[in-house]
Image (cartoon, rainbow, N blue to C red):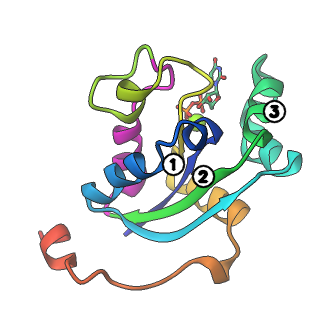
Amino acid sequence: MDRTLILLKPDCIHRRLVGEILTKFERKGLRLVALKLIQADKALAEKHYEVHKERPFYGSLVSFLTSSPTVALVLEGREAVVVARNLIGATDGTKAAPGTIRGDFAISIQNNLVHGSDSNENAAKEIALWFTPGELTSFTPIDTPWVAGS
Ligand code: UDP
Ligand code: MG
C-alpha cells in the first residue's frame, strides 16, 4: 500500500469545496491516514515547494499557501500517488480534463485547489514535513476486501 500527501490549498477552503473534494478521494477507495486544518508558516511553505525555488512564481506561491489555512491529509491505497494525481488533473485548471478536480473546479494555474505528491519518494518527504509520526493512524477499513480485492 502506498501513501500520498494531499493539500486542500487555501482557495479550496475559501470556496467551501473541502467536503466535495474529500469525497472524490474517499469515493475512489483511498483511506484516510491523517487529516488536519493548519495554516502553514513561511518555513513550511518554502520547504514544501523548495523544488520550485528558482521559478518566477515561487514567491507568489509561498504567499498563497501561507495566506490562510490549508487542509493537509495523508491517503493510503494501491498506487495512491498516481491514483490521486489522476483524480487531481493537470496543473493549469484551463487544461485539466473535465471530471478531474482541477478540470471541474479550477481555471487558474496557481489557485488550482489541490496538491498531490508526485512520487513515492516525495510523498514520504512531504508526509514527514506536514505530520509527526504520532499523527499517522494505522487501521484496515472494514470494506478493504471489496475495495482492494484482486
Ligand atoms: N504554479 C504556479 N504557476 C505555474 C506553475 C505552477 O503558480 O506556472 C503553482 C501551482 O499552484 C502548482 C504549484 O505551483 O500546483 C506546484 O507546481 P507543480 O508544477 O509542481 O504542479 P502540480 O504538481 O501541483 O500539478
Ligand atoms: Mg508538483
- Of the numbered discs in the image, which one, if any, rests on residue 48? none
The image shows residue 78 at horizontal and vertical percentages of 31, 62
Give neighbour class at mark 2: few <14, some 14-19, many 20+ (Cα, 10 Å).
some
Q: Quadrant of the N terminus?
A: bottom left
Tell me: residue 70, above or below residue 74.
above
**According to the image, label 2 marks what residue?**
122
The image shows residue 52 at horizontal and vertical percentages of 73, 30
Ligand 1, by image quadrant, is top right
Between 124 and 11, the one nearer to me in the picture = 11
| Residues tagged 1 and 2 counted as in contact (Cβ below 8 A) | yes
Q: Quadrant of the C terminus?
A: bottom left
Q: Is residue 82 magenta?
A: yes
Kind of residue at badge 3: Ser
Between 32 and 5, the one nearer to me in the picture = 32
- Of the numbered discs in the image, which one, if any, rests on residue 63? 3
Query: Mark 3 vs ligand 1: CB under 8 Å?
Result: no
Residue placed at 72% from the left, 61% from the top?
129
Kind of residue at badge 1: Ser
Q: Circle 1 — which element?
A: loop
Q: Measure the alpha-carbon separation of dots 1 and 2.
A: 5 Å
- Of the numbered discs in the image, which one, if any, rests on residue 119? 1
Q: Circle 2 — which element?
A: helix
Between 12 and 80, the one nearer to me in the picture = 12
The residue stretch that appears in magenta:
78-93
Q: Measure the alpha-carbon separation of dots 1 and 3.
A: 25 Å
**Count of residue discs:** 3
